Amino acid sequence: MEVKKNVLDNLESEVRGYCRNFNPLFKSASGSLMVDSNDNQYIDFL
């Protein structure tokens, strides 16, 4: 059971880890679409 818990903890930490390194400045958003200062578009799925 302990091994399974460690695997799940590691996988979960990878899932939420991307947003810690993500720091763009968004200039607009509408619904789930977000646009940064370089006009790159992102889908906000959180």
Image (tube, rainbow, N blue to C red):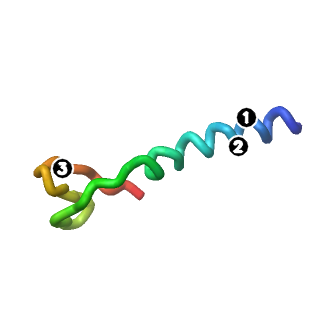
> Within the image, what quadrant is residue 23 found in?
bottom left
Say which residue appears at 27% left-offset and 52% top-offset: 43
**38 or 44, nearer to the observer:** 38
Say which residue appears at 28% left-offset and 54% top-offset: 24
At numbered mark 1, what does the secondary structure look like: helix, strand or loop? helix
To which residue does mark 1 refer?
7
Task: Tell me the quadrant of the picture where the N terminus can be found.
Answer: top right
To which residue does mark 2 refer?
9
Say which residue appears at 21% left-offset and 58% top-offset: 33
Say which residue appears at 37% left-offset and 54% top-offset: 45
Residue count near mark 3 (Cα–Cα under 10 Å), binned few <14, some 14–19, many ≥20: some
> Within the image, what quadrant is residue 6 found in?
top right
Q: Position of residue 39 (x, y in %)?
A: 11, 51
Q: Which mark is residue 41?
A: 3
Q: Are marks 1 and 2 in contact (CB under 8 Å)?
A: yes
Q: Amino acid at mark 2?
A: Asp
The vertical placement of 39 against 10, above or below, is below
> Within the image, what quadrant is residue 34 found in?
bottom left
Task: Tell me the quadrant of the picture where the C terminus can be found.
Answer: bottom left
Q: Amino acid at mark 1?
A: Val
> Between marks 2 and 3, how big is the CA–CA gap?
31 Å
Residue count near mark 2 (Cα–Cα under 10 Å), binned few <14, some 14–19, many ≥20: few
At numbered mark 3, what does the secondary structure look like: helix, strand or loop? strand
Residue count near mark 1 (Cα–Cα under 10 Å), binned few <14, some 14–19, many ≥20: few
The vertical placement of 6 against 21, above or below, is above
Q: Position of residue 26 (x, y in %)?
A: 22, 61
Left or right relative to 2: residue 34 = left
Q: Position of residue 17 (x, y in %)?
A: 52, 46
N-terminal-most mark, 2 or 3: 2
Q: Amino acid at mark 3?
A: Gln
Left or right relative to 42: residue 17 = right
